[in-house]
Image: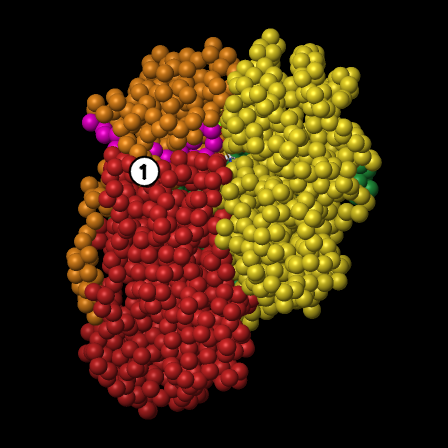
Chain colours: A green, B orange, C red, D yellow
Amino acid sequence: MDLHKTDTGIENTWCLGCGNFGILQAVKKAIPKLEEKGIKRNQIVMTAGIGCHAKIFDYLNLNGVYGLHGRDIATSQGVKIANPDLKVITFSGDGNGMGEGFAHTMFAAKRNMDLTMVLHHNDVYALTTGQFTPLTEKGWKGPSTPQGSFEEPFNPLLLILIAGATFIARCYSGELSHLTDTIVKAIEHKGFSFIEVIQPAVSYHAWTEYKDKIEFLDKEPSDFEEALNAIRKRHKFTLGTFYNSNKPVYHEQLYGDHNPIKKSISRELRLQKLKKILDNAL
Amino acid sequence: MDLHKTDTGIENTWCLGCGNFGILQAVKKAIPKLEEKGIKRNQIVMTAGIGCHAKIFDYLNLNGVYGLHGRDIATSQGVKIANPDLKVITFSGDGNGMGEGFAHTMFAAKRNMDLTMVLHHNDVYALTTGQFTPLTEKGWKGPSTPQGSFEEPFNPLLLILIAGATFIARCYSGELSHLTDTIVKAIEHKGFSFIEVIQPAVSYHAWTEYKDKIEFLDKEPSDFEEALNAIRKRHKFTLGTFYNSNKPVYHEQLYGDHNPIKKSISRELRLQKLKKILDNAL
Amino acid sequence: MVKDVFTFLVGGKAGEGVKKAGSVAAQIFIEKGLKVFQMDDYMSLIRGGHNFSIVSTAKRDISSHYMKANISINSDKRSYDRHKNHLDKDGILVYNSDEISDSNGIGIPFTSMSKKFKMGTLMFGIGAIAVLAAYLKFSKEKLFDIIKKEFSKGIEDNIKYATEIYDLIDPKLKNKYELEDGDIKRPIMTGNQAISFGAIAGGLNTYFGYPMTPASTILHTLADYASEFGLAVVHAESEIAVINMAIGASFTGAKVMVGTSGGGFALMVEGFSLAGITEAPLLVVLSMRPGPATGVPTYTEQADLKFALSAGHGDFLRIVASPASVKDAFYLSAELLDLVCKFQTPGILLTEKHLSESAMTVDVNINNTIWAEYNLSDDIEDYKRYLFTSDGISPILFPPSDQLIKWNSYEHDEFGFTTEKAEIISKMHDKRHMKLKTLEKYMKEKIKTVKIYGDKGPLIFSYGSTTMSVLEALYYGDIKARLVQPTYLSPFPYWEIERFQDEPIIVVEMSKSEQFANLLKGQGGITIKKVISKYDGRPFDPIDLSEKIKEVL
Amino acid sequence: MVKDVFTFLVGGKAGEGVKKAGSVAAQIFIEKGLKVFQMDDYMSLIRGGHNFSIVSTAKRDISSHYMKANISINSDKRSYDRHKNHLDKDGILVYNSDEISDSNGIGIPFTSMSKKFKMGTLMFGIGAIAVLAAYLKFSKEKLFDIIKKEFSKGIEDNIKYATEIYDLIDPKLKNKYELEDGDIKRPIMTGNQAISFGAIAGGLNTYFGYPMTPASTILHTLADYASEFGLAVVHAESEIAVINMAIGASFTGAKVMVGTSGGGFALMVEGFSLAGITEAPLLVVLSMRPGPATGVPTYTEQADLKFALSAGHGDFLRIVASPASVKDAFYLSAELLDLVCKFQTPGILLTEKHLSESAMTVDVNINNTIWAEYNLSDDIEDYKRYLFTSDGISPILFPPSDQLIKWNSYEHDEFGFTTEKAEIISKMHDKRHMKLKTLEKYMKEKIKTVKIYGDKGPLIFSYGSTTMSVLEALYYGDIKARLVQPTYLSPFPYWEIERFQDEPIIVVEMSKSEQFANLLKGQGGITIKKVISKYDGRPFDPIDLSEKIKEVL
Ligand SMILES: Cc1ncc(C[n+]2csc(CCOP(=O)(O)OP(=O)(O)O)c2C)c(N)n1
Ligand SMILES: Cc1ncc(C[n+]2csc(CCOP(=O)(O)OP(=O)(O)O)c2C)c(N)n1
Ligand code: SF4
Ligand code: SF4
Ligand SMILES: [Mg+2]
Ligand SMILES: [Mg+2]
């Protein structure tokens, strides 16, 4: 299939009105913008976890790996490390990336891996019928917590900031242009970029639960302290880029400007070097 | 074997001068103090991960489970949930509890599980010959990073605070009485208590690397903000209790003052109830 | 076609009450004293797509749905296209005339008729039930009673919508169906409910889970009944947490179960091995769906058998058993809970989506369930957790105790202290291996490890829910055969199977690589004549299967 | 006893340079043109305890250490007690006279003599080498050269200490040993080095690992050579990260390997299944240690075989092969890298601590290693990742490409899009299964799957490093037998094994439950006469083993 078609033509099985449509659209809009900036479509690799959010894999005409539940962010890291010329985007759910895959997310941030993670935050394990997630507010009556859940939710932006991410934003699937712009910025960003997207899962939550609460940061924080403050003090429906800074990225520290695939050493040279090593050992 | 012997008589295979001896001694001293406070020895259950730290399992005459690398903290949670009368202590290493088992540690804190975690922080995967851990400073030349590691370390106290722990302290295996007292306080504490112990692994680091840097908090923080501040602003060799607060614990939210084992419902009553359920369905 | 079976099929989008319509239909049949088999086919999505529920009922034991319906009711074109051939000879096709028209069926404008109600198309299921009621000459009053009993909200609108549909279709139905009454009302449950209730009856104290189709509803069922039965039911952060928590709970003497599907079990494997060496009583429910990896989450397969039989590094004893029916599942989960406690080792209740999520009427006698018991230590002096005994079983003790109780992931001595000594390593291996011998002896004496149906004719082997398909196919096709179904797969009950070594057999299973047939060959020394295997995610249909069996007999 | 073998044993505490002494001894033998087998026995600790290194050398091929030393040098009482019986008939026992005295041996005050040096007892290894040198009539000059070459720090003190020991023991050694020279100097490597170098020769681009004995040294070796060979070598946060990263790397066209032991592999199982369905080329090194669970980390066993053969849910193709020697390991890792690339499926190089961490001199011809290659797609229009082909292999393509490349964990259509359609589910199963047939054909034609040693006598089967023990035992015991060693275990090379079906065989392996014997029975239809199994963590000693074999022949 030609990569340059816009759509994959695969039947979309999200619920009518699902917040995931906004994310899908934003990505579709972001791609031409990235192309304008010289990031080619065929250079982009996507990965997705498992859940409603991850169905975006079938709808986006991008190369990639539909991975395991919670492991997509590890898979993305493998992609980047093996071929650093590729731009990698991970689409993750709140159960996926903050539950099963929590450690991978945090370590990707710790390493400042040069990739983008989009967290579809809908407060439920949507595809498995609505159980509470690590981000769900206390009291949620899902099928695994019929009396109401009683764990305090994680604050994903706070965790990811502390872990070491260098680009951190919150968006809303109802704010398409902000979301689109943020995706573009995140992909352009060198280092670990994390976008939490408030994504209403209409089968469990109505858009009206969010609509009025949504607000934007008046001023984007300019350093770590301000970011920390804004993330802690502003409420969970505050949108904007909370942090944007620079730090060495993992793959460059690992091997500089090498590329393990494109600059793979030939068989001849390998054998030659190996012979030398074996001879020297004598 | 009688639980009331002090020692297990098992050969100790830690290196001479290892910081783990301090932790072992402190626990041995803490137990009688806990007994004075009414916590019986036979009520205590220990778990341990895998690593040098975990060998404490063989040396302490306490009931428990020598678990899997990184999973001890999950095992501890299972112990507590099944029989909340038991007091549970987990002995974990920095590779164990902040690497392989990172997610379990963070979720135990999130749940404010009523147990104690002692993190033997020695900056290496000691037992597997000295690789860098998630807490190791950049530049460590272990066998997996011969050119020097280049990941920024996690700040364990900061992470655990944000995740939801309610008792947080840092100790040093060279400060025995502080360590002993802190262990007693942590075990008495209702909720998730976390003690990071700076534990020199003499085969990789000399005591002198720490000795002069060790300092105590002048004033123990009195609330979350102060704790956050102290954890962030004081350096990593600052000892003391950084946080001590109260929040509902997991098992009580799950089933109040029930005890799934001690108050297990009889076979007769179960069958009676089941019959009713099946009849009602008709 | 299937003279003594009546089948109701309802198809539509997820979220339109299709599954609910299936279970209400099942209740109607139950009210009439009939036996029921309900199979729900749904896609991995929350709204939309195509789902269907198919409910077959009879006076006799029935162990499968039939893909030939007496009445098929479809809410949209997709459903109609899918099911127009799933009709019995005289079957009636009802379709949504807002979307299509077909002179061979009866059109009902389900959509436009639902428009005026708040719930709109969500009510389609009610409409389907109204059609069924009319077809079965159920009075409207009886229909209303059922709606009141089965639905919790929007009763009034539901009744209005049902009435309108009933009145509209009633005159169009020329030949209504006379459904005879059966004997008594029986409870209906899904396999997962049976597993949950069976475990409760067997003494379950704690359940740890992480959602994964088709095992999630065990977590949900037990969470619902947790306070009623004093259980701790925990939804943990991952399957790895689940199994390691479970082992902690087991250490305290809790009777413990966990449940998952293949991908989740894959994550539990290290913990499973830990249960092996620590000798932790632990029951894992592994409900299979098509793999590998994420596979096809909401469909059925039997391709995790080989994996279940050997998951985990190192040598240790495991018990693996697979129930053939919902009723079996009920008794088996208690029986397995008992075995893992008695033999202090992990066990797997291996099942499939087809059993987990299909519902059947069951005749269970709750008093016959086994109550799980340990071989408890009364030796309160000089207790040794891993005491060397002649049968390999070291009596167990739980905290609080004044004796030292150490469970150890490393190889260990009798006290549970870590060892690297050659002789002790060997002896501990021998001890654990001895439990296998003891267990085999116990199984020979006390447990029905293999069931044989029929007493003459060629030999067929199957296991798990595929057995139900075969039974129904044999009945339907009037085939004389003996069907052998090993409930226990590990330890492999060779003592029951050996006698079949001289006859070539037919195997029916749901795995491309013929895992069950390979097990029979490798462990049972059985000669395989032919394997009938299906691996498209759908359970066998008894009519198709009977033909396939006839071909190879 | 073993006339043509000379054996050096050195025992002491971890941290005293015991292992280093073993490898310096090996270097001495190598200098003399001899062949060497070095086995290190160490406990799971960093300092203290009891370690020993045992180095056997001969002019002929030698494939095991012998637990009967010509000279045994022990730094402490524990070591002395342990090894006093590990002496050849005329063997010499050297002990630390600061701790014990024994008229049958020669005492050297290793401890007190080391006191004056900064490194103190850490120098014991040097002392042992000095003793060996004296015993072999090595001049002090040669000894100094070796010390200079092999040690990086404290050379001066080392030389001083060595001189003092040499001078002290020299007069006490009445009958010195005349070690004949061999032919040429050969490189020595451990199994893990061979695996690492073999993979590099085969085209490795990326390695992901997490430390776990006995696989850690692959990570260390590759990390050391990463920049030299342009590899990305990553120590990740867990084994789950490792395998999922590896699959990401594989997606980009990197030739990728990961390595671990049983517990780590247990965590990789879900990812292994993902590699199966996505058809990701991926090589896993699984180096076994005694299990279950944490087991006995620094010792050896072969009890993960069954697990390796069936790990992962669902049906998918896997390649499992086990090298019998260090040399085999070198070639095999490249060969497997090629096979996983060609057949786009995961593979396992299954080995054990005994091979991974023992060192052998090897005669390898580096030019004979295979270079891993893909079946690359040239079809750049209308590319289908999972194209249905007659051999089941869909040509592969890597990004960047203008064609759509989708790898999918769900069941999928030819493009890689998710599917729930019955027909496609079946067809994809068929396609993947077809690769098995293609692979079997390929193996029959192109690969030496089974090695047979000897041409008459009774049949013995073994695999992995146990083969080396058997070979040495046969040599030592002068036993005429044929030894069959399947290098490939999955797909099982029945075409090579079938011909042995009529003779009862003897199996030698290291697993309590006789996993290898069961494989031969189940898959090969082989009749087992007797299984010689050892499961105490220690490799076979050729002398013991030869007796055991004689008993059962
Ligand atoms: C190992 C494993 N465990 C469980 C599942 C089942 N599962 C599929 S999706 C999902 C929840 C996804 O939740 P989230 O990531 O929030 O995605 P959403 O559906 O809300 O977009 C789970 C638990 C799985 N596929 N694999
Ligand atoms: C699943 C698994 N992976 C790897 C290992 C190997 N392993 C044993 S101990 C250890 C490191 C322990 O480091 P840490 O927790 O810091 O403990 P320390 O030895 O420093 O006390 C590792 C990686 C294991 N036992 N299990
Ligand atoms: S369940 Fe929620 S997340 Fe899933 S498709 Fe529907 S609205 Fe979207
Ligand atoms: S290696 Fe370090 S942690 Fe381990 S015993 Fe020695 S000093 Fe202690
Ligand atoms: Mg979600
Ligand atoms: Mg450590």
User: Judging from the image, what secondary structure is the residue with disc 1 in?
Assistant: loop
**Quick check: is B45 in the magenta stretch?**
yes
D288 on left or right of B174: right
C253 on left or right of D367: left
Q: Is residue C92 visible?
A: no
Q: Position of residue D505 (x, y in %)?
A: 61, 60
**Quick check: is A228 in the magenta stretch?**
no
Residue at 20% in and 44% down:
B262
Residue that mark 1 sits on: C405
Q: Is residue B280 visible?
A: yes
B274 on left or right of C448: left
Q: Nearer the viewer, residue B159 or C469?
A: C469
Residue at 25% in and 76% down:
C30
Dividing the picture into quadrants, the one containing residue C112 is bottom left
> Which region is colored magenta?
B38-54
Q: Nearer the viewer, residue B219 or B201?
A: B201
